[in-house]
Image (spheres, rainbow, N blue to C red):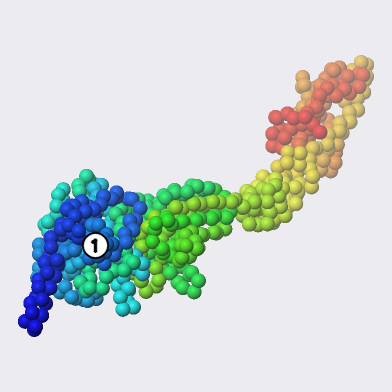
Amino acid sequence: MSWLSGVIRGSILVIGLVLLCAPATATALGEKNPPWSMISPRGIEVDSRLLWEDFKEEEVVDPEHLFPGIETGEPVTVFSGSICRAAGYVDPEGQAWEEIGPDFAMHSTLWYAFRGTGGPIVVRLDGGIGGGSVWMGEDFGVFGVALYRTDGVPTETDGLNCTRRTPAGPARFEFNSEEGARYLLQVGDTRYFNEPLVDTGFYLGVARPTPNPDRSHAVTLPLGGSVLVNNIGGALNSPAPVCSGGTKEYLGGRGAWGEISLSSAGNLRVQLEQGALEPASVDMIALYRDGESVPLVCSVGPFNPSVSAITELAAAVPAGHYSLQFMTAVKAYEDPVMSLEKRWRVTTSFTASLDQDGDGYTPPGDCNDGDAAVHSGALDIPDNGIDENCDGQDTRSDSDGDGVPNYRDRCPARPSRGIDADADGCRDPEQLQLTAQFRLTLRNHRLHVSSLFVRTNAGARVGLTCYKRVCGSEDRKVSGKRVQFNHSFLPVIPDGAEVSLAVTKPEHIGVVKEYQLSGAGVHLLRQWCTRPGQPRGKMACA
């Protein structure tokens, strides 16, 4: 019996080896080319939604609940060598924590195919429920992914990259694809112990990096509208923004950027809504003033998307240009580099404030609602060109109090006392007085000037001029209020002789009068005034 038991055990071992070493193309139930296999991989589109796959390993060995396409064996073929492990790897019973690193084997696998875009592509594999499988109360990432470039059945030499999910983060890599080239992804269970993966799966994403990884490439956010954004391959802020959510603090992970310009102050509202098929995560929005590196305000969303998949940020802001960063948040002890990469819909709205500058006044009582120092009743600072009190003009300094502001007062230290017809701030020149008293006698039809008295202002000068030389020209200064010309005329003057008198004084308006002398008496022919310092100029007298 012991011999027979040994034969039976040996037979079972051989059968087990045959099953384990069967070519990857020979799957359960003898299907030649099942879906998700190396020969007929599932086609996926770059930039399509994240793919969620249930991965139930027990269905490989249970013909009644077969999941078509799950292949058993190493990448490519059994015994062929693998891009995922170094030559000579022989630890099929190794524990999960011993297999973390570049050397690992895949036990059961699914295959996917896509075409290159001619640019960078991000491949990311996230664990499903619990972030992977749960074994002995620990959370382990048990899935790995290998990348091949081939137009047919892949070989080891077609392999480009291989990585696996770990407790620290997802299986992830970026590569530059050739346009139109065919690529294969092999996703598999990296455990080699026998416990089945029950009710677990993974998220698989294949996408181009976000076009909005930093501020210089920010997408313009329409007010009152929505745009789609993603943080796939997004950059990290340094330092990462920190937001409080509930009792925890979160760091900003990979992010995408948007920008918005506000022409007035008001209330900005931003909603970040994750897609229905995106993995659950804590999302974060950070709002920055233009050019600043520290957020003006940030907001953390709920963790449970079944309650709400929307993260909201609301802020009262002045007019200006703002940047917004959309991120998946991580806890302080997690690695932001490994933060989730996903897609959102961003919706913005804005309500302008009736009091734009927040000074408590609205138009028309506020004639400049962009300046809190300007409103009705405000202190108007003189001569600054600003109408702070909204009375329609800027208050002007008036040092001498004559009603003429300093900026156009030619005499700011001397008040004009209302005598300022030209409003230049200087007192108008005083017009001199001029009164002439002629004494004429007529003897034997001959006209004689007995005397001439001229009354004017003290200190003025009086000039006497006669036509046809009936008198000599004289210029006298008045010491009192009058001056007398007694011997200036000829003994006899012709009837109708003309005489001119002119009075002048510095900074005074001069007066000129012309008279005609005859036997009938003295007749004023004409008069005019002269500006100070301009004796030849003529102006009307007051």
Q: Residue at x 68, y 48 (%)?
A: 363
- Residue 379 appears in which quarter of the rendering? bottom right
Three-letter code for the amino acid on which mark 1 is drawn: Pro
Q: Is residue 386 above or below residue 514?
A: below
Classify residue 392 as left or right of residue 257.
Answer: right
Q: Is residue 130 visible?
A: yes
Q: Residue furthest bottom?
A: 2
Report the residue at 47% width, 48% height from top.
Answer: 226
The quadrant in which the C terminus is found is top right
Q: Quadrant of residue 522?
A: top right
Determine whether the residue tagged by mark 1 lies in a helix, strand or loop: helix
Q: Looking at the picture, does residue 157 appear above or below residue 244? A: above
Q: Depth check: give the residue in front, 231 or 51.
A: 51
Name the residue at the left extreme. Answer: 3
Q: How many marks?
A: 1
How busy is the neighbourhood of tag 1: few (under 14 within 10 Å), some, or many (20 plus)? few
Q: Position of residue 497 (x, y in %)?
A: 83, 19
Quick one: 168 or 263, which is closer to the camera?
A: 168
The residue to which callout 1 is attached is 63
Which residue occupies the foreground of this view, 7 or 340?
A: 7
**Does the image show residue 81?**
no
Percent of width and height locating residue 58: 26, 67
Which sits in the foreground, 378 or 269? 269
The x, y position of residue 204, in whole percent, is: 30, 58
